[in-house]
Image: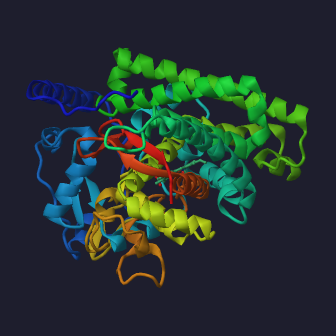
């Protein structure tokens, strides 16, 4: 089981504060953070300097901070990096939908949370949108001259690869994926169903209640499922019949989980400093990433071999589609490596796993909605399910911030933003803003069902996959996965949440529950 994620006590908190301050001061004076924007360019003589241009616009409120450390002390006092989304949420409540703050580093970031401003940022993102990258992964890629996945690419290289993947994963009819996603989901949920039936067959618990089955190691099970789904989409469901691939996937799941743990530890410590001092926190991360890349490449090689041996023409997968389009073998491998393992892209497996966990949690709190979803599924409708998925992604966006460096000076809602500024879209705040969604804390799937709700909402208040050219390439895959998992669960189980304390979110690379989720299943009786 995952350990319980506790809040630090006063002493640990003080030590944490001192550590963070020391480390930040050291790292600021020694290194430029890779999160800092690219160096500012000179303006041509004909253009006005930004300061003069800016004078015409409504000033953006600025949070005052100390020299060198900015407002880092405030963040630490609010619980540190793991509470960044809550901290920024409180700032928005104080300063409004747009403000500037320097949390450390050498330049301010601009935070925006209104639907219109967020949309405006995507309109100004330029031909080659640039986003901030996780320091630890960027450093790893540099140190190991590692092949970069789409997420890490820039400029023309990014656009070229993005266009290939857009054709395969975003545009057109993707129904061919359904069989693979359904078969992976069925395998996992059928196992839950058997265990649930076994628990229900045991004599009634005190009070005459049917016994429930508590899902063990939910986080790991959902990782494993996300990895299997991608594997099947790429190579077809038949590859899973190979015992060697099964055991490799078990191992791969474990090491991806470890990389996630190590990456999130490096969120609270400057990776560059950890790397130079060869601290265990860096060495563990590095060793794990090496292993994930090795093992991932071995799985892909093995799947290609199994595919060639089996030659099952009816098992349509991405591999066959690429072959049919005469894409060379090397290129096919490169695309798969990009999707599954290229450094940092494992993050997307984690995003799907945690979005699913949050959606199951949201559903477990709504017994009436579960009943309605079960009925809906029996009629082959899916509008309510669509609404539930939108609601869980709105309330629990696993990426609570999306960043863009603006390629040109821009005018955003009457404010002036200088070229190369890092603008962060506060998705967590936007999704819970009452001016975007009435009763924002409630799970109300109807708000997304056109014609069925009186609820006014601004759909751009929730952008869990971002929009624009650099939005999530796996959006349609992830949505299909969520539909498949939640649909099966709602039809077969009555779900409840056994956690005694209220469950909240913390940021560990992605937003995750602050305690192990304890979800219980009973067979659905009506
Ligand atoms: C519910 C699950 C998921 C969520 C919430 C999610 C969210 C996001 C977001 C917000 C971005 C944009 C980042 C930015 O603009 O800076 C993104 C990018 C990306 N996602 Fe996802 N994602 C999910 C699942 C997936 C899956 C399953 C895949 C792989 C099939 C994937 C692959 C990618 C890639 C490669 C990028 C980078 C795109 C680029 O830079 O052009 N994601 N994702």
Closer to the camera in the image, 172 or 43: 172
Q: Is residue 426 above or below residue 361?
A: below
The structure residue drawn at horizontal position 83% and vertical position 29%, both measured from the top left corner, is 305
Is residue 91 something that shows in the picture?
yes
The structure residue drawn at horizontal position 49% and vertical position 33%, both measured from the top left corner, is 220
Closer to the camera in the image, 364 or 154: 364
Identify the coloring.
rainbow
The structure residue drawn at horizontal position 83% and vertical position 31%, both measured from the top left corner, is 306
User: Horizontal placement of 402 versus 109: left or right?
Assistant: right
Closer to the camera in the image, 522 or 141: 522
Is residue 266 something that shows in the picture?
no
Can you tell which quarter of the image residue 15 is in? top left
Measured from the top left, where is residue 230 in percent x and y?
A: 65, 43
Q: Is residue 336 above or below residue 96?
A: above
Q: Is residue 432 above or below residue 3?
A: below
Q: Is residue 451 above or below residue 174?
A: below
Measured from the top left, where is residue 411 in percent x and y?
A: 33, 73
Q: How many marks?
A: 0
User: Horizontal placement of 480 versus 116: left or right?
Assistant: right
The structure residue drawn at horizontal position 37% and vertical position 75%, both measured from the top left corner, is 458
Measured from the top left, where is residue 14 in percent x and y?
A: 10, 27
Measured from the top left, where is residue 143 in percent x and y?
A: 50, 24
Quadrant of the image containing the N terminus: top left
User: Horizontal placement of 223 versus 94: left or right?
Assistant: right
Can you tell which quarter of the image residue 446 is in? bottom left
């Amino acid at each position: 089981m995952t350990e319980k994620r506790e809040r630090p006590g006063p002493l640990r908190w003080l030590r944490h504060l001192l550590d963070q301050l020391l480390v930040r001061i050291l790292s600021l004076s020694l290194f430029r953070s890779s999160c800092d924007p690219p160096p500012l360019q000179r303006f041509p003589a004909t253009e006005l300097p930004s300061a003069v241009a800016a004078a015409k616009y409504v000033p953006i409120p600025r949070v005052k901070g100390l020299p060198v450390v900015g407002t880092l002390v405030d963040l630490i006092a609010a619980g540190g990096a793991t509470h960044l989304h809550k901290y920024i949420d409180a700032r928005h409540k104080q300063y409004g939908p747009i403000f500037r703050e320097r949390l450390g580093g050498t330049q301010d970031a601009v935070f925006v949370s209104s639907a219109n401003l967020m949309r405006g940022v995507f309109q100004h993102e330029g031909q080659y949108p640039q986003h901030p990258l996780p320091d630890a992964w960027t450093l790893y890629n540099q140190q190991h001259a590692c092949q970069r996945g789409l997420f890490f690419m820039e400029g023309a290289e990014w656009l070229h690869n993005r266009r290939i993947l857009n054709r395969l994963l975003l545009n057109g009819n993707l129904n061919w994926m359904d069989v693979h996603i359904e078969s992976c989901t069925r395998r996992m949920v059928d196992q839950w169903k058997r265990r649930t039936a076994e628990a229900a067959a045991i004599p009634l618990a005190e009070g005459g209640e049917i016994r429930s089955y508590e899902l063990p190691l939910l986080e790991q099970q959902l990782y494993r499922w996300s990895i299997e789904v991608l594997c099947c989409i790429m190579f077809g469901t038949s590859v899973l019949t190979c015992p060697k691939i099964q055991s490799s996937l078990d191992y791969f799941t474990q090491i991806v989980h470890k990389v996630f743990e190590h990456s999130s530890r490096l969120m609270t410590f400057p990776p560059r400093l950890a790397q130079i001092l060869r601290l265990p926190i860096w060495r563990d991360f590095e060793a794990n990433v090496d292993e994930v890349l090795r093992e991932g490449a071995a799985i892909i090689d093995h799947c290609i071999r199994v595919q060639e041996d089996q030659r099952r023409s009816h098992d349509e997968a991405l591999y066959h589609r690429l072959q049919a389009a005469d894409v060379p073998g090397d290129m096919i491998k490169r695309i798969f490596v990009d999707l599954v393992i290229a450094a940092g892209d494992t993050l997307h497996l984690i995003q799907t796993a945690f979005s699913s966990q949050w959606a199951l949690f949201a559903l477990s709190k709504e017994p009436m909605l579960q009943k309605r979803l079960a009925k809906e599924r029996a009629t082959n409708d899916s509008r309510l399910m669509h609404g539930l998925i939108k609601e869980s992604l709105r309330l629990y966006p696993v990426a609570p911030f999306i960043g863009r460096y603006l390629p040109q000076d821009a005018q955003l809602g009457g404010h002036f933003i200088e070229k190369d500024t890092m603008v962060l879209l506060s998705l967590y705040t936007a999704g819970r803003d009452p001016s975007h969604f009435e009763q924002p804390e409630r799970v109300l799937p109807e708000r997304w069902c056109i014609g069925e709700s009186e609820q006014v909402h601004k759909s751009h208040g929730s952008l869990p996959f971002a929009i624009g050219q650099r939005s999530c390439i796996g959006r349609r895959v992830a949505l299909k996965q969520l539909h498949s998992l939640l649909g099966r669960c709602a039809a077969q189980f009555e779900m409840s949440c056994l956690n005694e304390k209220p469950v909240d979110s913390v940021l560990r690379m992605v937003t995750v529950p602050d305690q192990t989720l304890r979800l219980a299943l009973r067979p659905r009786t009506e």
